[in-house]
Amino acid sequence: MIHDQEVERILRDTPDRLVSLVNRAGQRCVTRVLRVARIHPRFATLVRHAVLDGRGSFAALGDDVAMTLDGYAIASRVLGQSGQPPRWARAVDAGVDSDGYVYVTTAFVEGTPLDELAAPLGDDALAGATVALLAVVGELHERGVAHGDLKLSNLVLRDDGGVSLIDLDTLREVPRPDVGAPTRDRTESWAAPEQLVRHETWLGSDLWTLARVVRELWGDRLPEGWGPSLASCRHPDPVRRPKIQSLRGHLFEGSALFDHLGEPCVAPPEPTSGTAGAVHTERVGAAPKTERVPDLAPRAAKSATAISAPAPIRPAPVGRANSGCLDLFEALGKGVVAASIVGFALLCAGAFGLKYFLAYRADRDADALMSEAKVHKTDPHHNGSTEREALWRKADALHGRTATARTCAVRALTYAWQQRWQFEEDWSQADFDKTSVVVNDALCRAEPEALLARATVYAGACRRRAGELAAVMDCEVAVAAVSELWARVPQSEGWHWFRVEAAWQELRARSALVARYVATKNAESASQAAAAFARCEDAGLWTPFAPVNGPELVEECLAIAGHVQDVPRFLRYADQRLVGLSTVAKERRRVFALLYTSGGEECTGATLSTKRGVLRVIGAPWCQALGHVARGCTVDAAVAMTEGGLGDTTHRWDALATELAARKGPCLL
């Protein structure tokens, strides 16, 4: 049940989703309830702001919920208002219902879905609907957004003849036509090959499904000449499909049709029969193949005016003997020189070509290794030491065969991971020196992977040297490496997991700096904390794509908020970390312990124990109170605040009391 909504009728009821037509404050809306996972009602505000404002993170809600809500957040953040009449169904409300399920309410678009038309449209109405469809999809593409699931049931024909988009949960940000964005939700019978095989949505993916929509809309009345244009939309390579604006101009204005690379998609129309050198177009699958048909008609005789008199014979130069032997030797000498020059040029060209080919193949293999690394960093089932070791060995062997900037960078990153610099473990100066040589290789210092490797190693050294002056320099090197990295990472969702890795290392370094500056009462602690919180907010858009290290990034944000006693932020990050908490007792206890040990320097010694099924905490009152509030244990929190709050002016008891008063719910066990 959802407050202030009255259900008119159920539109769709499946095990993972309930879609209803509702009345909300006198307006008709559509509400989608996501039944894939239950979450605590305390996250209703987080969901509402993230969906309606397009800011914040869904990572704490789990992948199934996050991937769906991200589409509506993109619509709010990138597309904005849908206008009047609405071109897409914008979100008007979101939250958590009484059963613990996330819901999204969108404005109801008056009209008829294209798959429910009672009677065929007239030609003029069809043309108008097609123009409107191309216009609204084109507007999405101009803003770097792909719909990802265009089909007749997701397109509504309005009474004014326009077309609106609904079901925006599949929206993905695709800033360039030559990259794809991760996707999971799609209709398999409509989806493009790259969506089915690679689980990616490209701008060209919309063209694949758009072609089918137009064909089914027009049926047998498809205008003459449209067939080849729509066939080019089914090219197996998404970047070779037409740009949406070019397709619109080609169909309705007769302009040339170009793909996303700026190359022609369809050959010119065939000349009339009998014309010499006619062009014959043959389609193999979806790709056009053009071949020239030879002219079999006899050629006309040359005109008399075209025949010229033979040129006069020039006399031999005076003073030169006509010796055949001398001419022969001269010709042979010139031939040997020419052959030598040509042979040398071919040898150089061959050597250069071979070197270029080997480098190209090595870079391609390095990219394939990074795809494996992405799986390692985004799939919890492939995140073990065996996978790390295998990645390092492959990268090292590849760089040994062909050394390029890319192979060098991938080798540096996999080596940093293999040496476990991302973990809090003991190390020796020799370990650091050896790894430092690899991650600072001049061949690849500026590559994104090498910058992340350098940040990982120096952030690890920064954390492991805690208390030493050298730690500050290590931390600053790590932060500088990440700062340089941001300008070099491609702006696509496919790299969000990489951004999470980089942000995590930056926050590891900044967390150590904040802890040191707070302990020494250094004024730099405020600026370091502010920079860290800004990065935490930015990372909220990326963490849904990094289920392995996303939670660890949130834990660093939690620790930084604890060091500076920013109570609202501490509890917000605690909420994010607790959503989707593991049911494994050991992991739950580790996360609970973080809530009590992340409240500042004095909290690092807090301990947890279990006796007869009851979790007991030993530590300073401030640490106990902060952890209890984060867990929702309001009674225990009030007791701890009573014990420690009297006469203590070193902690933010007032802010904690305000947050405690606003919190309700069971204590997490």
Image: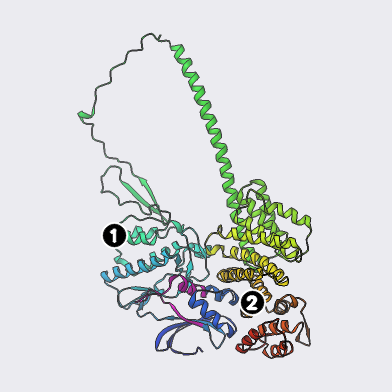
Place of residue 35 in the rendered image (x, y in percent of width and height, measured from the top left)? 54, 81
**Residue 286 versus residue 552 in the image, above or below:** above
Q: Is residue 418 visible?
A: yes
Quarter containing the C terminus:
bottom right
As drawn, the label of residue 253 is: 1
The structure residue drawn at horizontal position 32% and vertical position 67%, both measured from the top left corner, is: 131
Q: Secondary structure at mark 2?
A: helix
Span of residues in magenta? 69-94
Contact, mark 1 vs mark 2 (Cβ under 8 Å): no
Place of residue 530 in the rendered image (x, y in percent of width and height, measured from the top left)? 61, 71
Image position of 236 (left or right of 383): left
Residue beneath disc 2? 577
Specify the color scheme. rainbow
Amino acid bearing label 2: Arg
Place of residue 24 in the rendered image (x, y in percent of width and height, measured from the top left)? 43, 87
Place of residue 238 in the rendered image (x, y in percent of width and height, measured from the top left)? 46, 59
Q: Going from the N terminus, do you reach mark 1 or mark 2 first?
A: 1
Q: Residues within 10 Å of mark 1 (few under 14, many from 20)?
A: few
269 and 643: which is toward the camera: 643
As drawn, the label of residue 331 is: none
Rendered image quadrant of residue 306:
top left
Amino acid bearing label 1: Glu
67 and 92: which is toward the camera: 92
Q: Secondary structure at mark 1?
A: helix
* Nearer the camera: disc 1 or disc 2: 2
Q: Residues within 10 Å of mark 2 (few under 14, many from 20)?
A: many
